[in-house]
Image: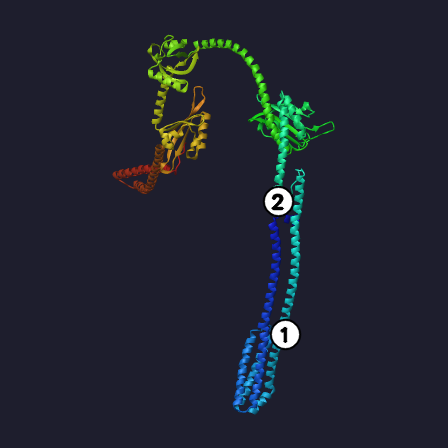
Amino acid sequence: MRSPLIILERRSLATKLLLGFAVLMVFMLGIGLSNLVSQRNLRDDLQLLYEKELLGVSNAKDAQIHYLTIGRELRQASLAGAGKARDVALQAMADNDEALQREIDALRGRLFRSSTKAALVVFEREYGVYKSNVAKASALLEQGAEAQAAAFVASEEFRRPGASANDALAKLTAIKEAGARATTEAAISASNQALQSTAIALAAALGLSVSIGWIIARSIQRPTQTLREAVESIAAGKLATEVPFMHYNNEIGSLARSIQVLQSASRQIETESWLKNHLAQCAQAMQSAPSFTTLAQALFSNLAPLIQLGHGVFYVHEEDQRRLRMLSSYAYRERKDLNQYFSIGQGLVGQCAMERTPITLLHPPADYVRIGSSLGESVPHTISVLPILRNDRLLGVLELATFKGFDAREQALLDGLVPILATNLEILERSVKTNKLLDETREQAQLMQQQSTQLEAQQAALQGILDNSPLGTAFSAGGVFKYFNPEFATQFGGQINDPAHVIYETPEDRAALVAELKSKGMVRNREMRLRAAGGRLHDYLVTFVPFVHKGEEGVMGWLLDITERKRNEQEIQRNRAFMEAVLENINAAIYVKDTQGVYTFVNSDWERVTGFRRADVIGRSTLELNHQGKGQAYHDADMQVIASGRFQTLEEAIGAGANQRIYQVAKVPMRDAQGAATGLCSIAFDITARKQAEVEVLKAKEVAEEATKAKSDFLANMSHEIRTPMNAIIGMSHLALQTQLDKKQRNYIEKVHRAGENLLGIINDILDFSKIEAGKMGMESI
């Protein structure tokens, strides 16, 4: 925890003075406030003394005087005879009674002690009795009974209430006078105490002022003295002296920062001088190096004593093999264990080469390279890996190890030395390359002679290829043929130096070809009609390029007769148009997909059913369209048919409510001549009307069955109704035949009986069939 003095030192001079004055002002304000409170309390006490105590005593004294005056005037009225003197005495009694009541009323508002209030109650009670006695005595006097009035005034009955009232009023007066004395003494005591407190506070304020002044002076003197010592040290040449108090945000901090700026400038001047001298020394040593190894040795010899180098390795970048090769090392005893090569990105060296930024490793592990001598060895404190760059081109990597980290001056030396090293390395590299180019030039002169011989052989071989090519090949220059192969002669005929325009169908065709050749530099795989031998027009696939043949500039052309292929393509186009017309006009929604589930064809009925346009569908899959939110399901179903190779049919409802249509879908996997899958064809027929007809048939069947059942129920009921009277007829006819009848009557009755039995058999059969139709009777096979 920092001391208050240090905290005060960090503040500005104005803040210190303001803080000191503020503390004193607060202390003085406290003293003033304390005095004001004391004065207010004293004022309140004096006001209470005057208003409650002194005026209360005055009221009580005046009431006593009026009370005594009433007694005296009563006695005067008793002694005086009837007449004006008695009337004056009685009037004086009335006036003093009114004055006594006024004083008592005033006194009542100035009583705040319970004892005085109780005494006032006793006085008013006794005075009331006394006042009644005075009134009684006055009445006797007015009646002329002076002797009775005198006897009554001298009686104990008259004296006792008056004495009690006088005693109560005297007691009240004594209490008020005692209260007045106590209040006065308390006010005097408080005043004395306030004076004493004020004297002590003033003495404390004086001591506090001295303390604050000493603290402020000390907070200014101590940092000033310390800063002065730092300035004297810097002036003596000790530039490493630390300037104190730079972090203070006050006048001392500003002065310290100004001194630090001067110190930095002096350091910078010294550092720049040191850097210039040693960089010039190192540059001079490296410029005279005749080889890469000598360059690296000169670098380490001059750099090692300046940065206290303990170990160093220099790697050169081999661009063609994309690796780093060790060129030289410094103070490394275990040469056989040192990596001779690093790939780009391998280890710290390779990583530095790949990122092309310096890498610094502090406090490496104990198993890293060790810096040693004959007296001992130890792990380095810092390992720094520096890329050697020249115009963003990697030339090498320098690895350094020291027992301590690099300070700012040493780091600046390395930063300045790396570009010098890169420049010398590039100059040396160019010198080596120049010598190598001279050697290569001599070797190339020998190779050119060999290549000339080989070129002549290659030209002869190329001529043989052209002569035997199945393509018609010709070279024209100056508007005439300079060369053509046997195939061209077979197709077009003609001789060398014949005009080249004769093979074109129209002059405009040749002009357009020449214009395109000039604008684009070549004509590749152009289809055009040319006039073959015999004047027949054939279709050719031609390629023309500028060409130099035997030192002459012209145009070389390759011509392939594609007349037969064009006829085949036209036939295929006609067949394709026929199939598309069939597919477009068939009353079914059809689409074709390839093996990836991508649409290659849809007809107009499919567009109408799905709502998609053909242009938006071709080249896309169901996954991309996400038809009805079921893109994944439709795609998977089609891919399963393609993979299985099996024909599939299904029914699918599209739409909802009154707009719903039912389709019978047939999915046919397509195969090529080798049996490999090429895609899928789906044909969807609208079977909504058929489905509706089937529903209507089922409904009609149900109605017919219900009608048949009703008929059967009716016949069964009617059969019962008919069979009952029929049984009666048969029975009665049977009974009639048992009687004596003549021949004619018996004939009639027998006919009736047989007809009734036949009708009963028919009714029984009808009843059985009705039961069967109603499901109430089963047929048993015997």
Classify 268 as above or below 190: above
Q: Is label 2 in a helix, a strand or a loop?
A: helix
Mark on residue 64? none
Whole-number angstrom distance, CA of label 2 to CA of label 1: 70 Å
- Nearer the observer: mark 2 or 1; the answer is 2
Residue 140: x, y in percent? 54, 89
Q: Is residue 170 visible?
A: yes
Q: Is label 1 in a helix, a strand or a loop?
A: helix
Mark 2 neighbour class, 10 Å CA radius: few under 14, some 14 to 19, many 20 or more? many
Along the viewing direction, whichever of 758 and 229 lies nearer the viewer: 229
Along the viewing direction, whichever of 526 and 432 lies nearer the viewer: 432
What kind of residue is marked 2?
Gly
Classify 523 as above or below 145: above
Mark on residue 253? 2
Residue at point 65%, 62% (across, down) = 199
Mark 1 neighbour class, 10 Å CA radius: few under 14, some 14 to 19, many 20 or more? few
Q: Which of the two labelled residues, at mark 2 and mark 1, occupies the earlier sequence position?
A: 1
Considering every residue shown, the one lying at the far top of the view is 495
Colour scheme in the image? rainbow
Image quadrant where residue 45 sits: bottom right
Residue 749: x, y in percent? 28, 39
The answer to whether 671 appears left or right of 255 in the picture is left
Q: Quadrant of the C terminus?
A: top left
Image quadrant where residue 141 sits: bottom right
Residue 502: x, y in percent? 34, 12
Mark 1 = which residue?
178
What kind of residue is marked 1?
Ala
